[in-house]
Amino acid sequence: MDIQVSRKEKLNDLAFFGGRCLFTEPKSTSSLAKPDFDSFLDYSEQFFKRQHYTNNGFLVKLLEKRLAEFHDTQFCVTFCSGFWGLVLAITSLGLKGKSEIIMPSLTYRRMADIAAWAKLKPHFCEVDPKTLSMNRYTAGECINSETALILAVHPLVNCCDVQGLVSLGLEHGIPVLFDSVESVYESTSIGKVGSFGDAECFSMHASKLLNGFEGGYVTTNNSELAQRLALLRSFGFEGQDNCAVAGGLNAKLNEIHAAMALTNLDEISQLAARNKRRYRQYQSELQAIPGIRLVEFDESFSTSYKNVVVELLDSWPLKRDETVDILNAENVLARAYYSPPLHRKRMSYPHVPASLSETDLLSERFMLLPCGDHVELGDIGEVIRILEFIGSNGVEIASRLEEREAS
Ligand SMILES: *Cc1c(COP(=O)(O)O)cnc(C)c1O
């Protein structure tokens, strides 16, 4: 634990007001899984000896096979990032001649850019305040004659309305693509995440559950789609120069990323178990802090316990963004939950203008607390103590902040 013992007694002890910072190293909300180094070297030796570093190598194929098994799907196609996996899946699945893609506004900050690369206009939908995610009703309100695709994005804790969104798509003949980046390890009442809708997209960025440094993949039971995606990630070429599909680019995963992803996949259940211990610690210690509610995992199904999301209730004395700023100054890299929401951001590309009052309210109430493999149980105790200090001195802190703003 790299804590400078700096217990806060008065306001000036807060780093935000010039005191010493709680952690010397930042404690972020990224997973940053650190697997067994020797296993990583063992995998890496395999591509190194073959001198096959990229272009559908041995480890990429092995990883795709293992991920398809893990998600109970027939096919898995890897990419250099989740971003390009999503773009290529959207361009492949979207109904031709239609211009809109339905997605939540309270979601990953790059989602509208992804739509722009796929040449579709985001049509932002509301979320259900109980789950913080889109469902069949909020998505259904956005369906019109221009809808090309429903992008069903899972929230940071638990899953979206999988069954409802799949049936909505079937009813209207609109393809459904899941962004399951935050639900790699989750199960629902109708089975494991990975085989729902037309396809599901995942990321292997170091901050996500399955760390491949960078990378992404798409799972599907549609063999034509899988073949098409495998061509698109490799310039759209078959053989040397024969352009089999238009719109291809270079979005291949390389072997060293596959080696890291395989090492982490071998250890994913241990990672989930460590996440669970961290989550339990937050769960028990947060109870003592009035004004903060932990967003709990539904433990009736498999879950990764990765993200620690809290709601700041009306009784919490500070605004969410003020709280985040004060924590960040201590090197507690708490993050606002998907804020600003996408429909509030300035956008240079076409989109369907939206007015989403529920999303506006929700986007100011939630934040993520440090989690992942660089966070030790003792660190969590320190995060709790600083929250306690902020909460019990909140009125004073608020007036100090007001003075600052006035001057
Ligand atoms: C991170 C993320 C992505 C993009 O993944 P990259 O591999 O970083 O490109 C897409 N969707 C969601 C919900 C994400 O959190």
Image (cartoon, rainbow, N blue to C red):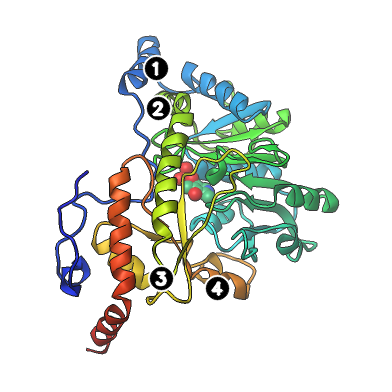
Specify the label residue 23 is tagged with: none
Q: Nearer the viewer, residue 236 or 144?
A: 144
Residue 93: x and y, percent?
70, 44
Taking the spot 24% from the left edge, 60% from the top edge, the residue there is 330
Q: Nearer the viewer, residue 402 or 243?
A: 402
Q: Earlier in the sequence, mark 3 or mark 2?
A: 2
Specify the label residue 260 is tagged with: 2
Compute the Cα span from label 4 to label 2. Answer: 39 Å
Residue type at mark 2? Met
The residue pinned by badge 4 equals 360
- Asked if labels 4 and 3 touch by Cβ distance under 8 angstroms, the answer is no
Residue type at mark 4? Asp
The residue pinned by badge 1 equals 43
Of badges 4 and 1, the one in the foreground is 4
Work out whether 274 lies above or below 106. above
- Asked if labels 1 and 2 touch by Cβ distance under 8 angstroms, the answer is yes
Compute the Cα span from label 2 to label 1. Answer: 8 Å
Q: Quadrant of residue 11?
A: bottom left
